[in-house]
Image (cartoon, helix red, strand yellow):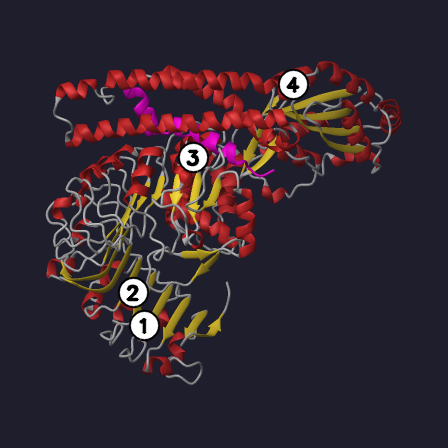
Amino acid sequence: MAESFLFSVAQGVLGKIASPAFKEAVAIYSIEDQIRELKKTLDAITAVLLDAEEQRAENRGLQLWLGRLRDVLYHAEDVLDELECEALRKRVINRYGGIKKKVHRFFSLSNPVILRAKISLKIKEIGETLSKISIEKNQFHLNVRSVDDGVAQMRSREMTYSFINKLDVVGRDIDKQKIIEILMRPNHKNLSVVPIVGVGGMGKTALAKLVYNDDRVKPQFELRLWVCVPENFDLKKTIEGIIKDATSQSLSNLDIQQLQTILRNTIKDKKFLLVLDDIWSNNRSRWEELKALLSEGASGSKIIVTTRSLEVASIMGTHLAHNLRGLSHEDSMTLFEKWAFDEKEKQPCRDLLEIGNDIVKKCQGVPLLVKTLGSVLYTKEEKWHWAHIRDSETWKALGLISLTGEEVALEDVVVEYANELWKRSLIQQEESFDSMFSSFKVHDLVHSLATIVAKNYCSRVDLDVAEIFEGVQIVSFSGISLRGISNSDRVPPFLRKPTSKRLRAIVSPINNVNDQFIAREFVRTCISKCNNLRFLDLSHGTFEKLPSSICNLKHLRTLVISYNNQLKKLPDTICDLQSLQELDVTGCSELRELPINMKRLVSLRILVITTKQKNLRDTGIQYLENLRFLTLHGCQNLEVLFEGTCRLTCLQRLAIIDCGGPISLPFVELIGLHTLLIRNCKLMLTEENKSNFPSNLCVLLISNFEQVMELLQCLDKSACTLESFFVIDCSGLTAIPEWLSNHTRLGLIRLIGCRNLLSMPQGILSLTALKELWVDNCGELSERCRPTTGEDWPKIAHIPKIQLDEKRVQWTED
């Protein structure tokens, strides 16, 4: 069964509790004990939650139970977010200052004493409610489930089998030899039992398979039998399994009396080797019953038992348990390289090997973990993905190793999700020649399925809707349904109802330019009634000012106010949104200036702006240490981004679009920049700027840019990093510099509408990493690149994918 939505919410709450940032917040307000108890209760509920979701359709009582749980989980999420937000705000105040009036500050809820009491009471109430819900779960007799790669499973794993490829096992020769020596010893007992004990994933089953299939062992036993024991040690099923392996007959229709007779006759006076794999139960009476039946075998018969439990080993074993230890680091690395890298590679990438070495150290010799993580990374060539596996909290989820690590960038996670959906053909990528972002479309059938799946959480509404369902978290407005509405103030009635407090996202139509229903009253209602919002889209609005009360949306992560042609000012209070991660005011052509304290938006990662300002220095944007994406669009008066101190060390993508200029850029400070987009603007390319051009640039996109040749002279330093190179509608591009041959990682070149570019450089022959080349509408160059007949064809014929004038003339799939 697929991982449930409610389970994801519960996991999200537990993940927040475990995060370093939240632990810091908890310590500030001294509520460790309350949080510890809350986590303990939530762990117990989450363990059975997947089973509850699976059974809910057939059990009305269970549906009600899940409904109550859903409500308290959402409330818990809000309270925990509030705590984290207040701690973040406290950090900002300590850094940049805050309210000066001490009396006002003391009686404010921001006073630590008052806030601690308030938060503590809320968490206590949540804990008490969760405790009641946890007790109520017992009446439903739910099973414990775990999750692996998004798939829910029972605690026991799939049934095992005896075959093994010996080449897949590394570092177990000594263990194998010790077990075989025990099996080969003369023994006059009818039955002896050898337990193999180890934690999950240590390779107990693999070791048993090696012994079972060894050529020295096979001749010693007339029968060799393999059974994966049911988790509860079901005697009947275990006997069935032994008989089936011995005779190839399925006898599930017989009762246990008939089965025990057949088992005794099957093994009577025969020397056998039996592997009982993965025993969990410590039920001694069942073991004694089975052992009595197995005693019919000949003297010298042996049983190998694999188990995680020393107690099980002591109950069943006649020999001391063989405790299976972790692999050595050298053996672990050998196993990891086997699963993480293509065997055809003569020498894996050194950088990835170094990260892999760190990953393997954290595996602490657990073969399954080494193998699993190697498999996960097999098709991944990006260093960030390997670093994420090395640093992520995934290790602690797995329950094997308790580690803390740096959180992976949210943007990288989104890219990974999008790639997975694309690989499964659930989304289709749309071509975009001059954008920093990829766009995707969804097939109508997939959209319909998603709508059905999400119907309890998402709702498409119009302005006349009076009420929404209680569980709805996201509402989006239908552009078509907004025409001819009867609602005079253009505020839907449901926004004024108590259910609106539950909303996490309000989304306006993608193309609602003709509807423009988002006026001042609509905005005020959203802010006053929906104070738990995480995402608020007010694009294509008709309001001149954003209310100063926007600061009350303390949970807000994304605020979109794009293409509001009447917006002239943003309130200073917007800078109090310390949890805000994305702010989009692009297309707001009348926006005079940005607030001066934007440095207080310490969580901001994405900023897209249009403004009439000439200089952004006074806004404080240059101090946004977590900013990843910055887009300047339609800033016609802009001349200077910022001067002096700059802390944009995390900035990865910079886009400057339709901005007039010339604009001075502080390239020397942008050490993390890997994507640069310049379209229809002019830069002030001083000698200092040129010499400090970003050296880690991976993607360069230039469109309608007169200074193209001047800018390209700066690219020498990016020879080791540049991967994608786009030049679009640049008549000034007359030649590709000869240094192109130095860019050994360059995999994609697109030249579109460059009519004065006359030929390909000879150095393109040496670009062995180049997989795709586009030459569209480039005049004489297009002719020179014609297959076979073109003068430049011999220079580019080695490239697997070539598009010429919008036609694929050579397209070899990987």
Tell me where residue 123 sits by quadrant. top left
Q: Amino acid at mark 2?
A: Asn
The one nearer the camera, 259 or 729, is: 729
Q: Secondary structure at mark 3?
A: helix
Ranked by sequence position, the earlier of labels 3 and 2 is: 3
Quarter of the image containing the N terminus?
Answer: top right
Kind of residue sitting beneath label 3: Lys
The mark that comes first in sequence, 1 or 3, is: 3
Identify the residue position indicated by label 1 in the image. 763
CB within 8 Å, label 3 to label 4:
no
Tag 2 and tag 1, C-beta contact below 8 Å: yes
Residue closer to the observer: 803 or 33: 33
- Report x, y in % for residue 473: 44, 37
Question: Within the magenta stretch, is there residue 729?
Answer: no
Q: Earlier in the sequence, mark 1 or mark 4?
A: 4
Q: Residue at x 32, y 29 (%)?
A: 21
What residue sits right under mark 4 in the picture? 312
Rendered location of residue 408, percent (x, y) = 37, 40
- Tell me the residue that label 3 is attached to: 361
Q: Is residue 364 left or right of residue 560?
A: right
Residues at marks 2 and 4, CA–CA distance in whole angstroms: 64 Å
Q: Position of residue 794 (x, y in %)?
A: 40, 79
Q: Residue at x 45, y 39 (%)?
A: 466
Residue holding disc 2: 742
Q: CA distance from mark 1 to mark 4?
A: 68 Å
Q: Secondary structure at mark 4?
A: helix
